[in-house]
Amino acid sequence: MLRIPCPHCGERDYTEFRYGGDASKPRPAHDERDVRAWHDHVFVFANPRGPHREYWQHVQGCRQWLILERDTATNTVGAARLARDGAGA
Amino acid sequence: MSRGPQRLAHGGRIDRDRPIRCDFEGRPLEGFAGDTLASAMLASGIAIVGRSFKYHRPRGLFAAGVEEPNALVTVGEGGRTTPNLPATTLELRAGLRARRQNGWPSVTIDLGAMNGWLAPLLSAGFYYKTFMGPRRGSWMTYEPFIRRAAGLGRAVHERDPDRYHARHAFTDVLVIGAGPAGLAAALAAAAAGAEVLLVEQDPALGGALLAAPVTGPLEHWRAQLEAAVRATPTIEVLTRTTAIGVYDGRTVALLERHDHAAPDPERGAARETVVTLRARAIVHATGAFERPLLFADNDRPGVMLASAARTYLNRYAVAPGRRALVATCTDAGWLTALDLAAAGTAVTIVEQRDEVAPPLADAARGAGIEMHTGATVARALGARAVAGALVEPLAGGRGRRIDCDLLCVSGGWSPALHLTSHTGRKPRYHPELDAFLPGDWAAGDFGAGALVGAYSPPAAYASGLAAGRAAAAFSGHARAGRTPPAPADVDEPTTFATALAPPRHGRGRTFVDLQNDVTLKDVALAHAEGYGAVEHLKRYTTLGMGTDQGKTSNVNAIAMLASLDRRGIGETGTTTFRPPYTPVSVGALAARNLGRHFRPIRRSPLERWHLANGATMIEAGPWLRPWFYAWAGADVGSAYLEEMRLVRGGVGICDVSSLGKIDVQGPDAAEFLNRVYVNGFAKLAVGRARYGVMLNDDASVLDDGTTARFSERRYFMTTTTAQAGEVMSWLEFLLQTAWPELRVHVVSVTDAWAGMSVAGPRAREALERALPGVDVSNEALPHMGVREVALDGIPLRVLRLSFSGELAYELYVPANHGIALWEHLLDRGAPLGIKPYGLEALASLRIEKGHVAGLELDHRNTLDDLGLGKLAAHDKSYVGRALRARPALQAEDRWSLVGLECLDAGARLRGGSILFAAGDAIAGHGRGYVTSVTFSTVLGRTIALGLYQGGLRHRGEEIVCAFPLKDETVRARIVSPVFVDPEGTRLHV
Ligand SMILES: [Zn+2]
């Protein structure tokens, strides 16, 4: 079972969190009207084998969205920081 | 008392002072404490332990541990019945009731053995070939027969009265397996200062050492090691505990068995406990399984792994035969031969190698053992049991018959690398050992003993010490400490060199997988038919898919496959091992999560009132909600119609506390709402509410609901019950990741407020009576108007909103005042005939009004699909706007919302019915489906909402609603989804 180091709550079981997808690419600006930009953001993923950054929310804790480093090949969890402290990319 | 004809007078690890009698198929079976059911059966001369899976051939004990493929028994009675347990893992205890399985009318006289005549039908892939062909229906016909004839033991439907527990645990170093390697690792890790948990599936410590003679030096050493472990306070020992799965982050699932202590569920004692263990480091010392040699009719009762024969002899003091033939290519076979000879058994050795180490040969000669080197067994002889073997020189030449009633086989060792594979690490083949070993190690995982090829006790011990020290260091403990010495004088050979000899083909069947009845011929056939990859072979032949997971068969099958491909065993590779390592009862996995503990139930603050006042409750997602009330009828079918009439004709009150409620505050709250809803919220006035729809980024509809503005910076959002959690997370996501510059806070207040809807033409009258100081006139509180007032000092929110289409108000008070307000409304409204209505009526009223809800909001439909496109603003950006413009989402033939009116007024229409145009054949996915259905009291007929290709462009057409599972069709007309008051005049009175 993975453990995620929440900056607020400390190391917690991943079952307290929800997964929120790829955090490695920037979300288009809210008023971006280009379909291609949103298409690429919503549907196109690199799906790397190896180091990756992803969103996780501590739903059963502080409710904060985190950006977590996780190696998708080994499932090794690295550092986590608050998403509000800086954009994903 | 002899306790069985095969029991030796002396020796063994059984406690002869504690005789035990258990029930075996209604007859007493006797043995001693320390016996397994299998050893007691063998001692009593029970030779046939089961019938084989497909061919119903008689089978005998083959192994002495968890790898046993044949001796599966059913244990217990009634709800305690547990099928398919290896008799080799069941401790003999008073009260044990066991029976053999898979034989009819009995295991000894089995009519199903005629399955052998049907053998051509039952070859590799027979399930697929026979039942998946063009005449697929045949599977339905034959399946029950095949299952009964060829199945394993059967589970029961009765409730299991036993208790099962779950707990969590933590340790510095987990050591899995208490053989010489594991004992050494535990001692070394503890000496370095680590806290150690040592788990062992067996009741006793020692692993393979337990098979050595009890009077020899190995036992002396084993006892010393055990004493040292027991005397170390920082080593916790769990016996009868299996590590069943290894997961990420060095999380290990352990299964503790307590049957030996006769746990009493009435006193809270558990039969089994699943432990979720977190370890800083793990030492895997899981040992190895002996591999059989393959030859024709190798499944005859009396054919047994050499290590198992040695275990029965030395550990349980049972003579597994009177005249033994040991067929081997390993030194381990010679140990068995020597011990059998010492116990007075006549022994012949058939050794594949041309020569063995001189000390072994000398010892065998001294023990009077007949030796044949450079030879192997080509075939087992005998019908119901082994009576001899056909022995052939490997170099060629005539074979000869050698009589025996025990045929021991020793074909090398397969390390038990199941657990190390659980986290996805591939085994690697080591030709010098003829074995797969763990390929690589994750940080914090260490291996020792036979698992890493250190087979002999001294080698295992040394590797255990090293692994224990390394694991302790990894967990942060590197103190210098002392450990007991390795054994000085051990009479075990140190070479276990083996060779995977190609199997001999003769007449008769050669079984690779005894449990699933897979033969060499099946492997060859699968290979010839193109299933040459190990994973394909496994699925096509079911090899290794039995309850033993092929512990004795995998490597032989891979070797066979490799030889067919003329390539290396390492290249052929292994199948993937997955948890659990050994079978686990469902009860243990469920533990205490039963009944109301299965999952949390969310309860309305008004529930106590509902239960006391005739409500029948129903589960709605995690919520329990009132379904209907007894005042309206005895069953839901009649009650909800009465409740609907109440709302359409008078006034009713409904608990809506389960709606999601989110407090939205901040200087930028208006901008925030304007971004998340498709419709405009920037200009929503204080004191007003607005219906809004949210999209996901991909433009599918996420949720709808109403948000009220109570002050400049303070909003009160409601969501559907089903999407409350989803919407909350989404708002938090947007605020924290996308728009951190917005000064807005969102807080879930769902549990803080009780909500109730007062609905019906007389709703205003009801409010006037209940809230005399509050002006609820149409002028003061128009449709979509909201007020915050106080009632006896209690804050009360009044929102004029309607879900049913009637004049209606939603009232919210702090949850602990909910029942007081509810009773107050009922009391003051009594002269108007106000009564409660439940979820069924609520849902039906909204269908009549054409409001979409959970069944339509399934994250697949767009705004336009649901007829809500006109809501969307053109002068602002909102989440999902860009992707909403995708051409495919704008296509005219998308399945979109329609109303359906059944032509036959009283027709029974089922939710999920598939929609077809009038002339269509009733086949396939149709042109849409029914999402919600009810009987309309207003129209006096069955109506529905649904999604239909092209939607309302087909208004007026007659279509067919089909429910093929029940062979039902209902004719209906496509109409507007708003069945009641389409102009909305009732809302504005
Ligand atoms: Zn947290």
Image (cartoon, coloured by chain):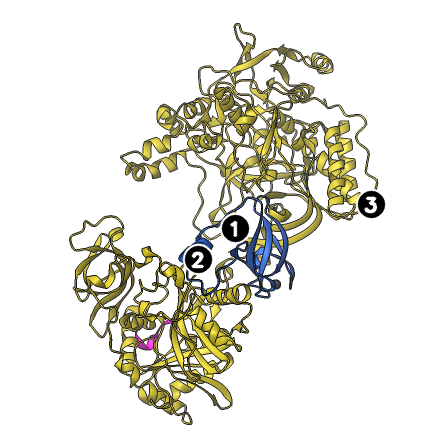
Ligand 1 is found in which quarter of the picture? Answer: bottom right
Are the numbered discs 2 and 3 placed on the same chain, yes or no? no
Magenta residues (range)? B626-633
Where is residue B780? Give x, y as percent.
37, 90
Q: Residue furthest top?
A: B397
- Choose between B695 and B360: the one closer to the eye: B695
Answer few, some or many: residues within 10 Å of disc 2's Cα (few below 14, many 20 plus, some between 14 and 19). Answer: many
Question: What is the quadrant of residue B626 in the picture?
Answer: bottom left
The reply to whether residue B70 is visible in this rendering is yes
Q: Which chain is yellow?
A: B
The kind of residue on which mark 1 rests is Gly
Q: Nearer the viewer, residue B149 or B321?
A: B149
Q: Position of residue B347 (x, y in %)?
A: 63, 16
Q: Are marks 1 and 2 on the same chain?
A: no
Considering the numbered disc 2 on the image, is that residue within a helix, a strand or a loop?
Answer: helix
Chain ID for blue: A
Q: Which numbered disc, 1 or 3, marks the residue closer to the eye?
A: 3
Report the disc number at residue B587: 1
